[in-house]
Amino acid sequence: MRTKGKILLVDDDPDFLEMHKAVLGNHGYDVLTATSGREGLERVRAEMPDLVILDLIMEKHDAGFSFSKTMKTDPLFKTIPILMVTSVAEATGHRFSLEDDGYWMKTDDFLDKPVMPDVLLERVEQLLKKSKERR
Amino acid sequence: MGIREGCRRVLAEEGYAIDLAEDGNIGLEKVREKSYDLILVDLMMPGIGGLDLIKKIHEIDPEIIVVVITGYATIETAVEATKRGAYDYLPKPFAPETLSVLVKRGIEKRELRLEAQRLYHERELRLLELAGEKSRLRTIIGCMADGVLVTNLERQLVLWNASAAKKLRLSGTDEPGKPLSHYMKNASLIESLENILASKDDNVSMISREIPADDAKSVLMAQMAPVRDEKGTILGAVTVMRDITKLKEIEKIKSQFVSMVAHELRSPLAAIEGWLGVVISGEGGGDEEQNRKWLIRAKERAKSLLALVQDLLEINKIEAGKVAQKMEPVSLNDIITKIVDFFRPEAERRDIAFRLNTSPQLPTIRADVQDMEKLFTNLISNAIKYNVDHGSITIETTADKNYVGIHVQDTGIGIAAADLPRIFDDFFRIENKKTSKISGTGLGLTIAKKIVDSHLGHIDVTSRPDQGSTFSVYLPVQK
């Protein structure tokens, strides 16, 4: 069976990994998971996913940033779109936006946690489509 | 009447403005209505006697020059009059020149007095006397812990104390009365004072301003108020300064704590909402059984959220000073036994054994029973959570003449040396492969330490990764 795409979820919260996996899996995506930035990079190298969904604050404060920086500066992986999911916006009272922070965040899109299933599905579809068009 | 008219003609020629009155009462009426520099009073008059008249005139305006005109037979009365406030006397009959000269002298005197008054008032306004004043009050101001500064309308510094000099790093203070900028460069303070001094608003009572101190590390709180005289006229401004650097640090720590709390609360809540979203939307594609499992996951996060809130309330209670309240002699052995019994079923599930090496004869400790129960609950709960299956927990007591020691030792995963310094910090949890399945709020040890500290004891920990940890609580012996 052809899947709609291979998605890697990187999040240290096991609940988010499972719930996003359930929703995405149910809609025909092939879902991989990782619970840390390091594990996530290993999976990227091993599996070459079509999209990475990343939780910003993981074990260290800049874990999310350094993960995306590594991906975007690697010629093999820089075309893989990254969707960053974060609850940092409210926690630090700072709204991230692609316009202000995109240049150093090096991600393709942001969503605020918790992400509702319909929003997640829609955003994933958009990003995969855009990515295919670029190739 | 002849004298009145005669004097009027003589003095009018000299250029003075003249008013006439036929008797004392009419004269007083005029004095009430108009301002006079000099009054000529004939002592022999019907109605009010001349001597009384002098008194009444000065009641209205003490600065009026009064010259009494007397009959030659009444020199004693004239002398009496000068004692009562008359400037001089003029015996009848008198030549026009004599009158002229006397009035001229009187007017000169009047002008001198007005000038002196003006200078005195001016000096008062300038508050410059403050700079030279040496009084008991000045000594008290000098000893105040808060900094005090007084500036006058000319923006000169007329008063300061040692504390102000130190806080603002004043220089050149051997010369008082110079403009404020001569002594210090703090632009923020100078600007605020300018606002107070320039204010036309009678109701301006105080400005409060946080001023960064020149050393760039401290923060001062300056409270500036206008100095007013009895009439409400602004004479200057008084500034009181306090170092609030510590307060600001505490503010910052509190704010960070609130931030951390919000973050910690958000995680479980987001997970609960997420699970509910999956079940309600049906997008997860789960059947009834699967949905039930997901709801159970949501419930577990809700439980951990409640535990967190519980711990936060506990911490708040401690911060509010509501611990160590009900101090009484306690039997640590009883408390420990109670907690161990409570946790035994949980420990047995993982085949973890309790070993109690407690001395039956411990010196008396005064403590709050509830706090002690909470303390040992947290320590023993950790000893189980971070332990390995088939491991053990040993609880030992020691005592010297000052402290009783309770040592909780486990055979668990231990703590890395790098993590030890932070082990009692708020929300600090070790996150690695070994701890990923262990739930907790990160506040258990924080609370334990706060309880021990409020009992004037201390707590510390020794540990080796994979070899277990020992938490030691020392509580003061009741003397």
Image: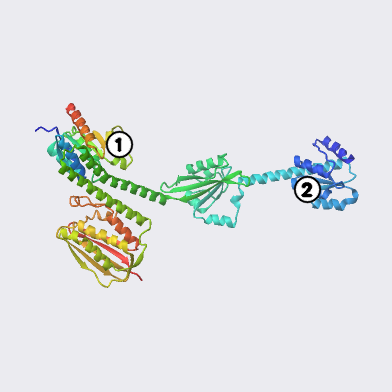
Residue B356 visible somewhere in the drawing: yes
Q: Residue at x 83, y 38 (%)?
A: B11
Q: Residues within 10 Å of mark 2 (few under 14, many from 20)?
A: some
Q: Is residue B339 left or right of residue B210?
A: left
Q: Residue at x 38, y 56 (%)?
A: B320
Q: Is residue B320 left or right of residue A24?
A: right
Q: Is residue B321 left or right of residue A60?
A: right
The reply to the same-chain question for discs 2 and 1 is no
Q: Is residue A47 left or right of residue B380?
A: left
The image quadrant that residue B466 belongs to is: bottom left
**Three-letter amino acid code at disc 1?**
Phe
> Which residue is identified by label 2?
B56
Residue A101 locus on image (x, y percent) = 29, 35
Report the coloring of the rendering. rainbow
The image quadrant that residue B295 belongs to is: top left
Residue B34 visible somewhere in the drawing: no
Quarter in which the N terminus of chain B is drawn: top right
Residue B113 locus on image (x, y percent) = 73, 45
